[in-house]
Image (spheres, rainbow, N blue to C red):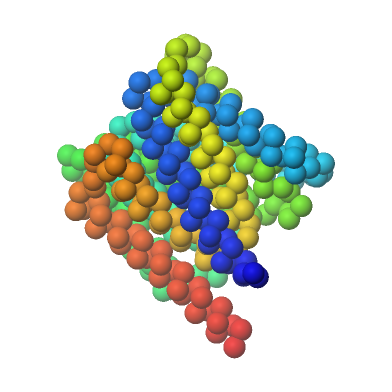
C-alpha cells in the first residue's frame, strides 16, 4: 500500500511517542531505587548495542558521512544529552503526565524554530496558535504558585533541547542512515552517564530492576529510530503536532504504574497546547491544498 510521506511520518511519530513514554515509565520506576546516572549507563549499553547491531545488519556503516553531516550528528547528540539530563532529573520529582504536558509545546516550538532557522513561512494565524500554546504551558507550570518549582523549569529546558535536536536533523542529506543518527545520540547519552557515575559509584542490580532497564533500553531504541525517521519522512509542520499523543500515554501509564493523575489545571493547559498544535496541522494542510489548486 502506497502512503504519503506525511502520513508515514505521522505514523512513525505516534509510534515514537508511545515508545518514549513506555521508556520514561520504566526509567521513573527504576530510578526510585537506583541512582540516575547508573541507570542511564545500563540502559544506554542496551540501546547502543541494539542500534550498533541494527546498523551492522543494514549496512549503515558503509554509508560515507561528510564533515557537515558529522557536525550535525554531533550537534544533535549534544542536544540529546542535555535533553536527557534535564528530562530525567525532572521526571524523578514530577508526575509523568505533568512533565509530558510541558513537553507538548515541542511541536509549536519546532514550527517556530523551523521558521526562524530555515525560513519556513508562518502566517499570523499559526503564529497566534504558537503564542496561545505557550500560554497553555504557563498554565501547566503556573509560575508563582505553590506547585511551581525548579523541576518544571528543567522540563522546559529539556523541551527546548529536544527542539534543537529535531531541527538538527533537517539539513542532513538523505544518504545519512537514521540508525547512525540515533546511534550517535545513544553513545553521547551513555558517555554522559559514565561521567555521572564517577560520583555515584557502582550499585548492585536485582532482577526486577534489570528487567525494567532492559525494557527501557528496547523501547528507547524504537523511539530513537521512529523519531528520526518521522522528522525525515514528512513536513515538520505536519508531523510534529502528533507528539501530543505522548500525553495520552503518559496519563494512562502514570495512572496504571504510579497511581497519579494530572490535576484540572494541568489538563486544561495541556488541552490548550494540543489544540494549538492541531490548529497548526490543519492550517498547514489548508495552505498545501490552496497551493496545489
Q: Report the side of 183 relative to 25 (left or right).
A: right
- Image x and y of residue 123, in percent: 47, 73
Q: Is residue 122 above or below residue 136?
A: below
Image quadrant in which the C terminus is located: bottom right
- Image x and y of residue 90, in percent: 36, 35
Whether residue 119 is visible, yes or no, is: no
The residue located at (37%, 65%) in the rendering is: 276
The residue located at (58%, 26%) in the rendering is: 45
Q: Quadrant of residue 97?
A: top left
Q: Nearer the viewer, residue 155 or 253?
A: 253
Image quadrant in which the N terminus is located: bottom right
The residue located at (52%, 33%) in the rendering is: 217
Q: Is residue 274 above or below residue 177?
A: below
The residue located at (36%, 35%) in the rendering is: 91
Q: Nearer the viewer, residue 226 or 89?
A: 226
- Image x and y of residue 24, in percent: 42, 38
Q: Is residue 195 above or below residue 184?
A: above
Whether residue 185 is visible, yes or no, is: yes
Amino acid at each position: 500500500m502506497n502512503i504519503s510521506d506525511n502520513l508515514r511520518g505521522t505514523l512513525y511519530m505516534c509510534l515514537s511517542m508511545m515508545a518514549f513514554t513506555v521508556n520514561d515509565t520504566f526509567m521513573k520506576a527504576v530510578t526510585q531505587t537506583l541512582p540516575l546516572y547508573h541507570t542511564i549507563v545500563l540502559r544506554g549499553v542496551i540501546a547502543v548495542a541494539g542500534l550498533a547491531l541494527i546498523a551492522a545488519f543494514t549496512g549503515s556503516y558503509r554509508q560515507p558521512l561528510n564533515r557537515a553531516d558529522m557536525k550535525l550528528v554531533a550537534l544533535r547528540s549534544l542536544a540529546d544529552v542535555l535533553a536527557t539530563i534535564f528530562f530525567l532529573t525532572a521526571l524523578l520529582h514530577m508526575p509523568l503526565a505533568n512533565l509530558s504536558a510541558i513537553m507538548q509545546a515541542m511541536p509549536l516550538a519546532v514550527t517556530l524554530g523551523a521558521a526562524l532557522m530555515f525560513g519556513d513561512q508562518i502566517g499570523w494565524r499559526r503564529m497566534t496558535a504558537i503564542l496561545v500554546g505557550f500560554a497553555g504551558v504557563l498554565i501547566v507550570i503556573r509560575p508563582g504558585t505553590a506547585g511551581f518549582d525548579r523541576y518544571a523549569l528543567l522540563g522546559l529546558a529539556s523541551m527546548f533541547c529536544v527542539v534543537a535536536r529535531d531541527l538538527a536533523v533537517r539539513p542532513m542529506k538523505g544518504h545519512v542512515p537514521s540508525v547512525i543518527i540515533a546511534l550517535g545520540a545513544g553513545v553521547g547519552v551513555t558517555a554522559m552517564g559514565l561521567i555521572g557515575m564517577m560520583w555515584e559509584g557502582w550499585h548492585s542490580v536485582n532482577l526486577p530492576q534489570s528487567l525494567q532497564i532492559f525494557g527501557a533500553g528496547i523501547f528507547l531504541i524504537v523511539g530513537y529510530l521512529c523519531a528520526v525517521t518521522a522528522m525525515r519522512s514528512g513536513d515538520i509542520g505536519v508531523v510534529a503536532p502528533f507528539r501530543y499523543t505522548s500525553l495520552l500515554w503518559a496519563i494512562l501509564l502514570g495512572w496504571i504504574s504510579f497511581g497519579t493523575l494530572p490535576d484540572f489545571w494541568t489538563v486544561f493547559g495541556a488541552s490548550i497546547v494540543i489544540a494549538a498544535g492541531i490548529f497548526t496541522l490543519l492550517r498547514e494542510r489548508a495552505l498545501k491544498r490552496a497551493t496545489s489548486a
